Image: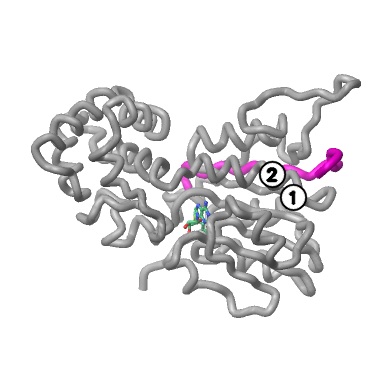
C-alpha cells in the first residue's frame, strides 16, 4: 500500500512544540497525520485542531474525541478557531507544501512522472488549475513565477517556448509540457529543472505564499504567552518569510520599534539557527532533504491583540 506521507523532522518539530498535556494545539497541515499523531500522544485533556484543504487527507482523520479535523485552508485559522469556541492556542505546527501523496497520485498533475491533466490544485473546489496558468498567463508572468518560485536560471527561454507552443495547440497535460520543454533544458539536469518548473506552477496554483502570510499574521492574535510556533518550510522564499516574521513580526522584514526603541515582535526565536534534517533522515526519506525548521515562542501581547 502507498505510504501517504513520511513526516519530516518529526522529533525535532514535536520537541520544539513543548507540548503541555492539557494544551490546545493546531496542526495546520494534517496530510497523512504523522505530526498530528505524535502531538495527540502527548495530550491528556488537551485538544488538537488539524487543517488540510485536500479532500484526500480527510480519510486519514484521527478517530479521537480530542481531535477536530477542519477541511479548509489554514489561511482561515482564526475563523475556524472561533467557530470551535477556541480563543487561544498553545502551539501551532505547519509542515508546508504538498505531501508525498500528491506526487504519487497519477491523476493530479503534480509530478513529472505521471501523465495527467495539468491540474495541481490541493483544493479541488478551487477553479484555477496549472493548465490555466500555462495557457493564459503572459510571457512576463510565466517568466516571473519560474524565476521566483522555481529559481530557474533562464526563465525567459522557458516562458517564450510555452507561449510559442500554445499558439498552435493548448497545453493540457504534464506529458505535453515535459515534451515541449525538454529540448530547452540541459540534458544532465533535465529532471531537476522540470521538477523546479512544476514546483513553480504548484506554488502559483495554490497561492502558497499568500496562504502562509495570512496564517502567520493570524498567529499574532491567537497564541497564549509562551505558545510555540513551529514551521517546516521547503523553499527559500517561504523560509525567508518565516524568518522575517519571527524576527520582525512581518514577512517583509520591516523593523518596527516602540517609543523606547525596542523591537515590536510578537514572537522570539527559540533556535537561533534553522534546523535541517540529519543525513540519516535524508537517507531514509529523501523527500525531507529540503526541509528546514524554525521554532519561535510567543512573547507578550500587543495592545488590541
Ligand atoms: C507536507 S504535507 C504535511 C504532512 C504531515 N505533516 C504529515 O505528517 O503527514 C502538507 C499538507 O498540507 C496541506 N496544505 C498545504 N497548504 C495548505 C493550506 N494553505 N491550507 C490547508 N492545508 C494545506 C496539503 O494538502 C498537504 O496535505
Q: Residue at x 43, y 50 (%)?
A: 287
Residue 14, by quadrant, is: bottom right
Where in the figure is residue 99, as x and y percent of width and height? 44, 56
Q: Quadrant of the C terminus?
A: top right
Mark 2 neighbour density, 10 Å: few (under 14) some (14–19) many (20 or more):
many
**Vertical order, 24 against 279 (above or below):** below
Compare residues 134 and 43 and report the one nearer the observer: 134
Q: Element at badge 2?
A: strand
Return the x and y of residue 192 as percentages of the image width and height. Answer: 30, 38
Magenta stretch holds residue 82 = no
**Residue located beneath label 2 in the image:** 295
Q: Is residue 278 above or below residue 18?
A: above
Q: Residue at 26% x, 46% y: name it.
A: 131
State the image quarter where residue 44 is shown. Answer: bottom right
Q: How many marks?
A: 2
Q: Which residue is denoted by mark 1 in the rendering?
A: 228
Amino acid at each position: 500500500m502507498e505510504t501517504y506521507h513520511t513526516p519530516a523532522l518529526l522529533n525535532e518539530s514535536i520537541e520544539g512544540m513543548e507540548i503541555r498535556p492539557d494544551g490546545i494545539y493546531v496542526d495546520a497541515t494534517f496530510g497523512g497525520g504523522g505530526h498530528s499523531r505524535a502531538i495527540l500522544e502527548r495530550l491528556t485533556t488537551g485538544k488538537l485542531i488539524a487543517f488540510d484543504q485536500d479532500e484526500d487527507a480527510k480519510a486519514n482523520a484521527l478517530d479521537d474525541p480530542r481531535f477536530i479535523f477542519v477541511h479548509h485552508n489554514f489561511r482561515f485559522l482564526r475563523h475556524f478557531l472561533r467557530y470551535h469556541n477556541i480563543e487561544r492556542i498553545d502551539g501551532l505546527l505547519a509542515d508546508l507544501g504538498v505531501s508525498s501523496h500528491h506526487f504519487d497520485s497519477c491523476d493530479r498533475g503534480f509530478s513529472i512522472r505521471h501523465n495527467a491533466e495539468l491540474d495541481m490544485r490541493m483544493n479541488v473546489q478551487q477553479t484555477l488549475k496549472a493548465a490555466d496558468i500555462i495557457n493564459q498567463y503572459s510571457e512576463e508572468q510565466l517568466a516571473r513565477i519560474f524565476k521566483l518560485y522555481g529559481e530557474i536560471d533562464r526563465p525567459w527561454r522557458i516562458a517564450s517556448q510555452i507561449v510559442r507552443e500554445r499558439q498552435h495547440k493548448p497545453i493540457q497535460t504534464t506529458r505535453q509540457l515535459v515534451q515541449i520543454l525538454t529540448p530547452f533544458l540541459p540534458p544532465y539536469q533535465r529532471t531537476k529543472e522540470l521538477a523546479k518548473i512544476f514546483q513553480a506552477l504548484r506554488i502559483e496554483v495554490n497561492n502558497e505564499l499568500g496562504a502562509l502570510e495570512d496564517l502567520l499574521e493570524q498567529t499574532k492574535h491567537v497564541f497564549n504567552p509562551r505558545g510555540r510556533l513551529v514551521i517546516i518550510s521547503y523553499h527559500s522564499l517561504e523560509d525567508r518569510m518565516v524568518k522575517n516574521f519571527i524576527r520582525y513580526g512581518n514577512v517583509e522584514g520591516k523593523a518596527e520599534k516602540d517609543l523606547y526603541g525596542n523591537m515590536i515582535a510578537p514572537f522570539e526565536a527559540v533556535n537561533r539557527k534553522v534546523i535541517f534534517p540529519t543525513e540519516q533522515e535524508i537517507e531514509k526519506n529523501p523527500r525531507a532533504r529540503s526541509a528546514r525548521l524554525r521554532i519561535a515562542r510567543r512573547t507578550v501581547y500587543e495592545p488590541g491583540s
